[in-house]
Amino acid sequence: MTKSALAFALAAIVCTTGALAGTPVSQNFDVKATLVSACVTNNGTTNPVLDFGTYTAFGAQKTGSASIAFKCSRGLVPASVAFTSSGPYSVAGLTYTLNIGTVAPTLSTGSVDYDNYAYPVTGAIAAGQAGDNALAGAQTDTQTLQITF
């Protein structure tokens, strides 16, 4: 191989690699993701319980409370919150009322990457009710709290 042919071959190698050996080469690239924001329950593996305790027939009013929590994508603010049933509500033959309190969200901080909305729910069984003897004992009436956007 002649000197000129060798020089030409080296020049061709340098031109095709784009850089000399040991010279870094970089290229930007895009990273994409499509987020679908959402809220999910944040109450653990069991349903929260609003417990009125023991009500004696014709007795005094009983009250109870529970906290129903949802974790949401940061900045996703629920537009409304309501029970999926409008009542009247009854457990063990006793009529009761439900109310949703106001909520101040716990916004994400530190290692928590979501906003938490914990809704206080209160209920009351009015005084003087007889109840239903056929339903005496511990009874459960399941309700649902729903948030919408």
Image (cartoon, helix red, strand yellow):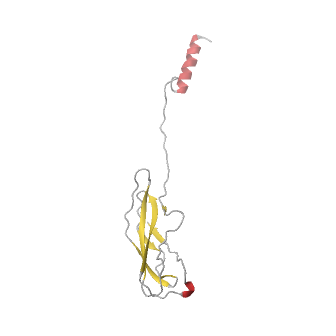
Q: Nearer the viewer, residue 117 or 63?
A: 63
The N terminus: image quadrant = top right
Q: Nearer the viewer, residue 88 or 65?
A: 65
Task: State how many labels appear.
Answer: 0
The residue lying at 54 percent from left, 26 percent from top is: 17
Residue 47: x and y in percent read: 52, 68
Question: In the orientation shown, which residue stands out farthest toward the top?
Answer: 2
The residue lying at 48 percent from left, 33 percent from top is: 26
Asked where in the image residue 4 lies, by quadrant, the reply is top right
126 lies left or right of 12: left
Residue 94: x and y in percent read: 48, 84
Q: Nearer the viewer, residue 109 or 85?
A: 109
Position above or below: 18 against 123: above
Position above or below: 40 against 111: below
Asked where in the image residue 6 lies, by quadrant, the reply is top right
Position above or below: 119 against 9: below
Residue 32: x and y in percent read: 49, 48
Asked where in the image residue 134 lies, by quadrant, the reply is bottom right
The residue lying at 42 percent from left, 68 percent from top is: 119
Q: Nearer the viewer, residue 85 or 97?
A: 97
82 lies left or right of 134: left
The residue lying at 42 percent from left, 85 percent from top is: 127
Residue 140: x and y in percent read: 53, 77
The C terminus: image quadrant = bottom left
